[in-house]
Image (cartoon, coloured by chain):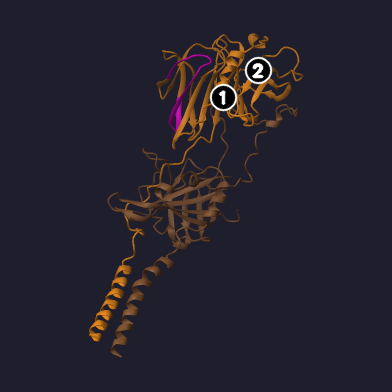
Amino acid sequence: MRSRGWMVLVVIGVLVAVAAPVGWVLTRPARTVGAATADALARATPPTSAPPAGASEVGGGSGGSAVPVRDGRVGAAVPVRGAVPVRVDLPSLGVTAAIRPVGVDRSGDLQIPADVAAVGWYRYGPRPGDPAGSTALSGHVDSAEQGRGAFFRLRQLRPGDPVIVHGTDGRTRRYRVVAREEWPKTKVPLDRLFARGGAPRLTLVTCGGGFRENARSYLDNIAVTAVPDGGP
Amino acid sequence: MKRIAAVAVLGLAAGLAVLGLGGPAGAAESASVSIVHGIPKTPVNVFVNGKLTLRNFQPGTVAGPLSLPAGSYQVRVFPAANTAGTGNPVISASATVPAGANVSLVAHLDAAGKPTLTPYVNDVSRLAAGQARLVVRHTAAAPAVDVRAGGSPVIRGLTNPRQQELTLPAGSVRADVVLAGTSTVVIGPATLNLAEGSATIVYAIGSAEQKTLGLVVQTISGLHSAPGGVPAGTGGLADDGGVPGWLPVTVAVGLLAAALGAARLAAARR
């Protein structure tokens, strides 16, 4: 009778030692959801894109009225685009952050605002409200000096969550999350995240995954894709 | 303007051989063709293969891009009043359009002030993120010039119909055109907006003698590249690469319990 008790302890001990890692692996939240949707958005042809310049017009005898002609004078009006974004809200995470326009640093990497509470907008790419392409916002997950960043909990966003972007035009543009993806930094589809074509969408980017202490750098990038509410 | 009104039928076979540089990559692949009007004070009609393609095409404007099947095209330019396309053209030339190329056909004055058509194959190679391409083409009846940006020469000794190109950080540039080796300004200054990921092609047009020198700008976008990476964290607070702390502890407790039970079992059997 005594030995049966010890037998039970052996069984329970082994079960705990096996079940804990198995359970951890199985219940971890998926790192990537909606990747196929994000891919499809990048390949989509926006309905409002300009009709293809008509090759058939030449020799078609239509009088040539279909050939687009632009003013080539210096300072000629450039088509007005969407609005410059100034603030982003992630209500499901209780986050609101100021947006600063950013470009690239000397090594060609994206600039991230020095203030970890702020979010950068890639100013060479599409603006919110543009008819096509990925409006890219990037924020620190954290920094060694300032702690948690605006996008610290970005990986907790889930499909359906709202994202709200405020523009200099005073308009508020609402998006909803359709995908969250994570890749090792060497495999990030940067051309897709910063695409100027495809369906109009918002892409939020930060760091994630494991952390390399000696390089003071994360191993992965996390991107959340959101589409205009009522959009595709 | 007498010269311009005068008929100039130009063979241009040699000049158009430039187009061959791109090399035909396959007959099915179309070329992208823009037409630039760089002859001041002369609205025209442009006939391509005998069809009126551009009606009342104004100086200083850029038409296109047209997607054209590779091949040879006859281009005839008439004064805007002539919609029939008969009689003496201002320019008559045949242009070979190579497959897959991006081409600008530029109606302009040669160094002597005669209307001519020069084809340029545009450099549409990709630019690094944050960069812009500036191409300057001398298509004016004027001597050699330098182009200055922010007061210092960036292009020297450019002559009609040659071109030079630069890669610069995107942004605004204050530029002017001076007689080569001098500080005698003949065009500008003008503020050029060099859009990121785009080629800004600036044509110096007109005639020095007639005091009609000026600039025409053509832009080719879509030459951008994505940034090289997104370095957005240096703290390690969000590190989720490792195993959570509770996991090895739980496993160790389980194994210890099992070992204890096994030891007691073994002792009991002895």
Q: Main secondary structure of the magenta part?
A: strand
Q: Earlier in the sequence, mark 1 or mark 2?
A: 1
- Residue B206's quadrant in the figure? top right
Q: Is residue A166 visible?
A: yes
Is B166 a magenta residue?
Answer: yes
- What residue appears at the point 52 percent right and 12 percent down from the top-left corner? B142
Taking the image as shown, residue B161 lies to the left or right of residue B153, namely right
Residue range of the region highlighted in magenta in the rendering: B155-174
Mark 2: few, some, or many residues within 10 Å (few <14, many ≥20)?
some
Above or below residue B28? Residue A164 is: below
Q: Which chain is brown?
A: A
Q: CA distance from mark 1 to mark 2?
A: 17 Å
Which amino acid, by three-letter code, is at mark 2?
Ser
Residue ID for mark 2: B94
Residue ID for mark 1: B23
- What residue appears at the point 51 percent right and 30 percent down from the top-left corner? B199
- Residue B211: percent from left, percent from top: 55, 13
Mark 1: few, some, or many residues within 10 Å (few <14, many ≥20)?
few
The chain letter under disc 1 is B
- Residue A115: percent from left, percent from top: 36, 50
Q: Is residue A65 visible?
A: no
Which amino acid, by three-letter code, is at mark 1?
Gly
Taking the image as shown, residue B93 lies to the left or right of residue A210, namely right
Above or below residue B210? Residue A89 is: below
Chain B drawn colour: orange
